[in-house]
Amino acid sequence: MATIQSLGIGSGLLTSELLESLLEAERAPVEQRLDVEQEIAEAKLSAFGEISSVVGELQTAMRGLNSLSAFNASQVVSGNESALTATAASTADAGNYSVQVQQLAQKQTIATQAYSSINEAVGTGTLSFRFGSTDIDGGGVYQGFTVNDDVAGRTLVINSSNNTLAGIRDAVNKADMGVEATIVDDGSGFRLLFTSAESGADQSIELTGTGTAGLDAFNFNAGSQTASQSQAAQNASFTVNGLAITRSNNLVAGVIPGVTLNLKATTDGPVNLEIEKDPGELMDKVQGFVDAYNGLKSISDQLSAFDPDSGTSGQGSLLTGDTALRRMMTEINSTLRQVTSGATFNSLAEVGVTSDQFNNYQLTFDREAFETAFNADPQAVTSLFAATGTVPDTQVDFLGAGRNTQPGSYALEITQLATIGRYQGISVPALASGNIVIDEDNNAFTLVFNGNEIDISLTEGTYATAEELAVELQSKINSNADVIDSEDTMTVVFNSDEARFELSSNRYGNESVIRFSDVSSAAASTLGLVLDSRGPFEGNQLNALATTGGLSSDPFTDALVIDASTAFELSINGISTGELALPGDAGTPVTYTTPDELTSALETQINNALAGEGITVSVAYEYNADNEQGRLIFSTDNAGDDIQFTEVNFAAASKLGLFLGSGAPVTSIRGVDVAGTINGIEAQGNGQFLAASTGAIAARQGFYLNVAHGDLSTSTSADSFRVEVDGVLSGAISLGELGSTSPEDVAAAMQTVINNSPAMIAAGVGVIVDYDTPSGSFGIISKSTGASSSVRIAQLDGNAGSLLGFSIGRGARGEAGVAASGEPDPSSGLRIRVNGGETGDRGTIDYARGAADRMNTLLTAFLEPGGVLSGRQESLNGELESIAERRVELEERMERSERRLQSSFTANDLIISRFNTTADFLTSQLEMLEALVTPKRE
């Protein structure tokens, strides 16, 4: 207020002090009120911060009691801990067991010859590892090897980068394939040791080196044992209460329910094993919860206390009457007092957790009562605290529940079991004969395995049996880096009855698929591994083709009369027979009495038409005894040929079972997800995992999906299409000549072009374009959801249809969007795994939420953004911000008051100054007049 200091100069009055007094009188009560409000708000904010901290401590304690592992503690006492120890879960029954160990499980170790240096070059080529059981007789003579089909073999490439002892050691260990490689110096030189990662008789190693002569030193197989076995693989042998048992590992689970044995040494006699429950650590956790609650109760009571005897009308505390604190404590106490009906123990009080009415209702914990209850029924005590789910079906595992899952018993029905993806090759009779030659013409192919497209190159050579070649196929596929990264494995077996290779994935569900995307003609012919829709044409089964005995030489049930009106046209790899009429152009009807007569006539006519093309067609007969129908099968010497009928008239269809297109057998069989209902509502399956639906149908996107694309390298600007998205029609979409024909790159380019269409931009709609690897097709997905969400191809020009796999409409597998509907179901969030069994009623899923689980959910809601505590703190911070704003407003108002008073005082000062000037003038005049009228004295 520097300006105030000059006030009063003109009038001679002390107006600056007066102005300051007036302003302070106006400011003081407002500023005092704001100070009090700020002090209270800051104190409350600090108090709620302290409460939040204590609530966090209580939540930590409750989380410890919401974990099933907290209730799994059991104590196991061994009579000889140097030879036998054990651990037990809560499911283990108390009791005594007699255990004797005759033999420990051990891993096999294979040792190479001695080398002068770990960096000595040992040759190049491949090292192949297979796992199984090695048979070595008492004299140490190698008798044979039996493959363990459950363990994938691996093949390592040995080249100039790793062809030393150290290089091979590092390559083996890096491959993480179930073998541990080490180098030791035994005095005669350095030896490379290969030890199986797992113990057990069926985990021994068969080692085969191929390539330069140096790798021959690594052989340990039926044909050559240049390497030696320094330790044999063997199973553990032991008895439990006199029952003889063998296992592949020294850690043995399941023999005694809920108990894992640790076999450490052989014993001369039985060792006593006593199992008893040990709730000591659990009781410490319960005490921690009680202490945390009491800490919260104390601070809550202190902050909300009211003393009626203080002052004239009583005195409250800082948070007396605060609705947030009162609501929080009410809900916490209600949760702890909640009763579970129908259980062994219905409340916390029954297991020793009670409130003391004589000590401000603090909780107390009776450890003895808790221990008694826990020993009587540990599962009931577990359910009283933690979230638990039980399923009586032994092939169904309970995995968990969601935050909104309500306690209850929910019916489970399985309508479809999950399956793995499989591939059934085409039958190649030559495979059964063995001596299969793999060379540069037939050793390579590309397949799609669970979404990964991988290139495989088989080791060239002659395979004595198809089973041996199956092992090579499996090894090369499972050794692929992408397959390893995806943690996938494939099993390849040779079906000798059908003379074909059969491949299966380890993964369950719709994403499990095996299909071949590139196979040479020679590889397809040798291996019977073909592209989709390739291979023999299998006609429709007909009553007209049934025989009396099911053989091709048996008479037809009714003689088959064929005339010239029975016409068809056959195409092999695009080479056509032209239109053919059976039995010929003469038009004279011919009666065929047996399938052999019919197939012979067809072969003759077809092969005459294809003379000079280097193609021979065989026609076979197949009878189905189940439905008593027969059919014709058309094949060539190459299992991978594309065999199609391009013309078939009614007579050929009804009498011969022919139809247009390919009749190739299904080779790629995609896996399916488990399906079923939980609580009567369709659940969501993913592989073997099934999750209860919310009951409400979420809004879904509309999408377009059709069939596999064609040769993308042939794309030109003339190939275009128009797409309609959410009712908005695009302009012509053309990809032109593609710089990259990678389907993923094409999908990205297509998405950009569609979304940049002016019509799409103007309407604010868009799409996502994905490449569906398993089907080889492009999917166009609307960015919107709901009933109005849709994608359809409206127009195709040039070769866009065959090029991109498009057709007019929504596509063979496209769907319209779906609007959200329905109400959430109480079972929402339940998750189970269905390991097997049968379809149909599978019992119930019983889900219970104990006090710790309910409390954890409640406290999370309090602490999370928007919760009671965080909301109250946000409100107090808002009050402090409001107080700060009001202080600014006060300063602004005081500045305006100061300026107003200054102006008023300045004006008054001028008036008074003028009055003073006038008064001075009049005084001087009066003095002059007085002088004039007063006579001078002499």
Image: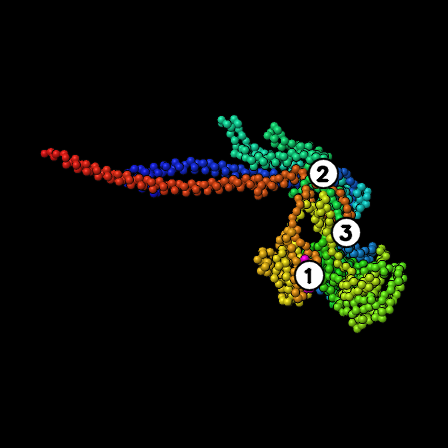
Q: Earlier in the sequence, mark 3 or mark 1?
A: 3
Q: Which amino acid does label 2 sit on?
A: Gln
Tell me the mark number nearer the camera, choosing from 3 and 1: 1
Task: Name which quarter of the figure residue 342 lies in.
Answer: top right
For residue 200, which numbered disc appears in the image? 3
For residue 625, which numbered disc appears in the image? none
- Judged by its main secondary structure, the magenta piece is loop
Q: Name the element at disc 1.
A: loop
Work out which residue is located at the far bottom of the displayed protein and give it: 612
Q: Name the element at disc 3.
A: loop
Pointer 2: what residue? 379
For residue 807, which numbered disc appears in the image? 1
Q: Which of marks 2 and 1 is nearer the N terminus?
A: 2
Residue range (magenta): 802-810
Q: Which of marks 2 and 3 is nearer the N terminus?
A: 3
Q: Split into 4 quadrants, where in the image is the N terminus?
A: top left
